[in-house]
Amino acid sequence: MWFLVAALIILVAYIAYEYRLRKPDHFILYESAGEVKRRKMRFYPHHFSLALPGTIHSLTVKVEAEARGKLGLQVMVILSVAPAVDHLSQLIRVGGWSKDAVVKAAKELEVIVYSAVKGYTEQIVIEELSSAKLSRHLNEQLVETSHALGLDLVSLSVQSIDPVDEEIAEALHQQESSRIQEQTENEKQKARIAATRVRIEADEKIALAEHNLELKKYELKKEREEKEAIIATLRVQDELKRRDMQLGSDKKELELLKQNPELLLLNPQFTLLAEASQTLRNARTVISLSPQETSQGSQILGVLQSFLTNLLSGSSRQTEKKTSGEK
């Protein structure tokens, strides 16, 4: 009984000593049949496994390179790597069975970066070198290489490419400054051209709008004048009709007076003329119808007397004709 209790205590102590709780940022590796595999359980045997940190490791690579023409350069590259989950066997083969395997593999990658930078810069003239182009080239070239080392290339950027010779550096600085100034001036001129083009287009639109407005005004004026001409024509036509009607009425009145001269005495115009003749010099109070006294009256009175005499003689002739006709 005591033996079983002791054996159980020893087993529990061994398990507590041997097994560890896996940390979230660690890969637990073990070797089986010559292959490196991962343990995914929360607890793992300490002496039969490798706890490999899965955090990102960053490093700075300074490269003494040369551009075409043997011009010295100093290139600074910053890169970040992490263990590649699908290439853990390659990582252990490069970095060894150690928790510093990522650091050792990164050292190997640093050497590859060094040679890749030198190989690229030696083919390019110094004026055409740029951090963006070199970063693009290294990222395209080192992705597969980092997988061969058991690493994932998280990021890679070229911080600077500086000529070793200060005079060359100053010349490049002036050249870049001139390029920037030229580009700035070009942008300013483009902006001026664009502003001028916009102003011209606006002026054209305004002129077109004013022209259309003038055309509309002309059309409205023409339409108004046409309507006024129509109205004037209608007024003239109405006036002519009214005059025709008045003329017809006057003709009928004259015909009536010819047929009945005695009605002339009832005409208000005749009365007014008689009153006006009395206001003339040497006018008589009583209008005489005798032919012997016509020379003693005014001219208007003479005209009226002649008119009445003619009317009376015409009336008496018509009466005689009617009488003779009856006989």
Image (tube, helix red, strand yellow):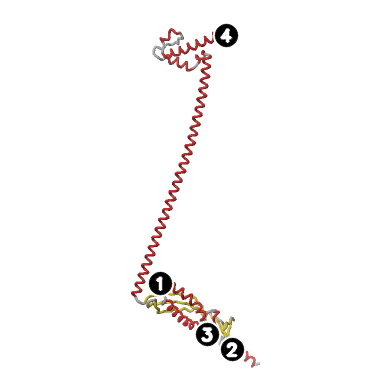
Marks 2 and 4, how far apart at CA: 177 Å
Q: Are marks 4 and 1 in contact (CB under 8 Å)?
A: no
Q: Are marks 1 and 2 in contact (CB under 8 Å)?
A: no
The answer to whether 35 appears left or right of 284 in the picture is right
- Tag 2's secondary structure? helix
Amino acid under disc 4: Gly
Amino acid under disc 2: Tyr
Q: Nearer the viewer, mark 1 or mark 3?
A: 1
Q: Which residue is mark 2?
A: 14
Amino acid under disc 1: Glu
Marks 1 and 2, how far apart at CA: 65 Å
Marks 1 and 3, how far apart at CA: 39 Å
Q: Are marks 1 and 3 in contact (CB under 8 Å)?
A: no
- 6 or 195, nearer to the observer: 195
**Sooner in the amino-acid sequence: mark 3 or mark 2:** 2
**Sooner in the amino-acid sequence: mark 4 or mark 1:** 1
Q: Is residue 95 depicted above or below 241 in this figure?
A: below
**Sooner in the amino-acid sequence: mark 2 or mark 4:** 2
Q: Which residue is mark 3?
A: 93
Marks 4 and 1, how far apart at CA: 141 Å
Q: Is residue 222 visible?
A: yes
- Tag 4's secondary structure? helix
Quarter containing the N terminus: bottom right
Q: Which residue is mark 4?
A: 325
- Tag 3's secondary structure? helix
Amino acid under disc 3: Arg
Q: Nearer the viewer, mark 3 or mark 2?
A: 3
Q: Are marks 4 and 3 in contact (CB under 8 Å)?
A: no
Q: Which residue is mark 1?
A: 128
Q: Position of residue 117 (x, y in %)?
A: 43, 78
- 159 or 41, nearer to the observer: 159
Marks 4 and 3, how far apart at CA: 165 Å
